[in-house]
Image: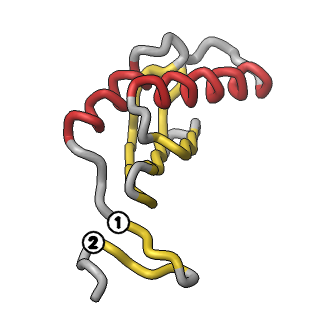
Amino acid sequence: MVAEDTVAVGGVLVDRRRCAPQEERRIRQALVSHPGVDEVLDLRTMYVGPESLLVTARVDLADDGRDAEAIEHLANELDAKLRKEVPAVSEFFLDPTPR
């Protein structure tokens, strides 16, 4: 029997639960505290294993003329910061395009 929050994907059980509210607050704060991020527009999390948290974030970047290389560097900085703040973060996907 599989728990309601768990789904089988390709023969692997995936936990569909979001992270705890305190983890989400730490993730959001880590993102908005970066000088290159003006606002977090959308934040989604999902546990894909017992201690493996997937994080996706759509952010509005500061209008400071960053080129593609600078945005890539910002994404790497945010990834490292999130993993430090919430060790369960195993995957981080950044969407720097506001809707």
Decide: is 46 above or below 26.
Answer: below
Residue 76's x, y, as percent?
Answer: 65, 27
Decide: is 99 above or below 25.
Answer: below
Residue 9's x, y, as percent?
Answer: 51, 79
Give whichever of discs 1 and 2 has the lower sequence position.
2
Q: For mark 1, does the 10 Å Cα neighbourhood hold few (<14), some (14 to 19), or many (20 or more) residues? A: some
Give amino acid for label 2. Answer: Asp
Residue drawn at (52%, 44%) of the image: 90
Give amino acid for label 1. Answer: Arg
- Which of the 4 quarters of the picture holds residue 15? bottom left
Q: Which mark is residue 16?
A: 1
Residue 37's x, y, as percent?
Answer: 49, 21
Q: CA distance from mark 1 to mark 2?
A: 5 Å
Residue drawn at (24%, 78%) of the image: 4
Report helix, strand or loop for mark 1.
loop
Which of the image's four quarters has the N terminus?
A: bottom left
Q: Which residue is mark 2?
A: 5
